[in-house]
Image (cartoon, rainbow, N blue to C red):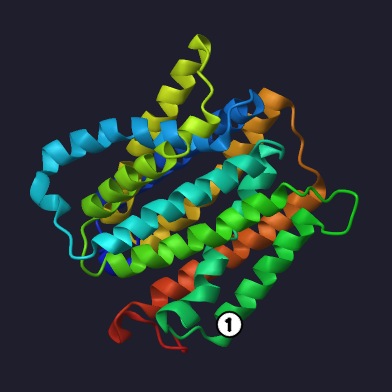
Amino acid sequence: MSCENMTEHGKPERIGVGLIAMIAAVTIFSCMDAIGKWLGMAGYHPLQIVFLRYTLALVPVSIAVAINGVASLKTKRPIAHLARGILMVFTLTMFFTGLRDMPLAEAISVAFTAPLFVTALSGPVLGERVGPSRWLAVIIGFIGMLIIVRPGSEAFQPHSLYVLISAVTFAIGMLFTRQLTRTESNMAIYTYTTVVAAFTAMLFQPFIWQTPQTEHLPLFMSMGLIGGFSSFLIIIAYRNAPAAVVAPFDYVALLWGALLGWYIWQEKPDALVWVGALIIVSSGLYITWRETRRRQPPAMQKSPAG
């Protein structure tokens, strides 16, 4: 969701609603990541996990369409929706592939390089100007990623490359979103992405399908349902509070990842993982601040003396 569609609401009660919605969404998404990791470790193919995640997400999507009406699905760019849906299948498949063999907090930290890639690619892809300060933030953020991944060392995990690839393709998907929001509604973007992703992943199921065990069915069902619900919570968050206020709370996922990883798998990220994560988070927050400030009308921006 791009900043063009986010209004700057100033009422404290509305900002409070936005913050609560964002924290709830991040918490639920973190649980979904943990479930995806658990199912991957149980032997299910990442594409099957992705298929059931998007297919079951059609339930909350259908409810939302019923509430908002079919008119909310009006689109001028069906090909762009198709491309975004396919890209999201690839992104989530790469993420779950890497997540299966990585500590949860470490994988989430690497995934948070996506905003850095969005900034780096917005120039050549969208023709947007990226100033020296934001480029510096991108470079520093990538240094943080290298600290976590540590290529060439004994601590290097090849599966981290899958998560890094997912961060790149997710960034490309966000650039698609930024273009789509100029003509498309949030409902149209989310609905078409879910439908296309479910259908795309379905094409691979004859080659990889493994009948889920009965005790695993609630986990698959919860992934789809909470994934769809979380997306609507994020829409609520950005509709009720400024982007610069709610976006930093996305990084609460790191804490949830650490807690869930420790509780379920006794994972304990080392000090360098936390150092790298702190660098990535700091770079991401700076880029968010600069992006929000850049999109404000000149009258709303403080002068250097202020």
Q: Position of residue 208 (x, y in %)?
A: 54, 31
Residue 67 visible, this orientation:
yes
**Tag 1 residue:** 133
Image quarter in which the N terminus is found:
bottom left
Q: Secondary structure at mark 1?
A: helix
Q: Going by the picture, which residue comes out furthest to the top?
A: 214
Q: Going by the picture, which residue comes out furthest to the right?
A: 154
> Badge 1, how many Cα within 10 Å: few under 14, some, many 20+?
few
Residue 17 falls left or right of residue 223: left
Image quarter in which the C terminus is found:
bottom left
Q: Position of residue 259 (x, y in %)?
A: 64, 32
Front-lying residue, 82 or 18: 82
Q: Going by the picture, which residue comes out furthest to the front?
A: 206
Residue 194 falls left or right of residue 263: left
* Residue drawn where x is 67% and y is 57% of the image: 278
Front-lying residue, 220 or 231: 220
* Residue drawn where x is 41% and y is 23% of the image: 221
Q: Position of residue 79 (x, y in %)?
A: 29, 62
Q: Is residue 95 above or below residue 24?
A: below
Q: Is residue 201 above or below residue 7?
A: above
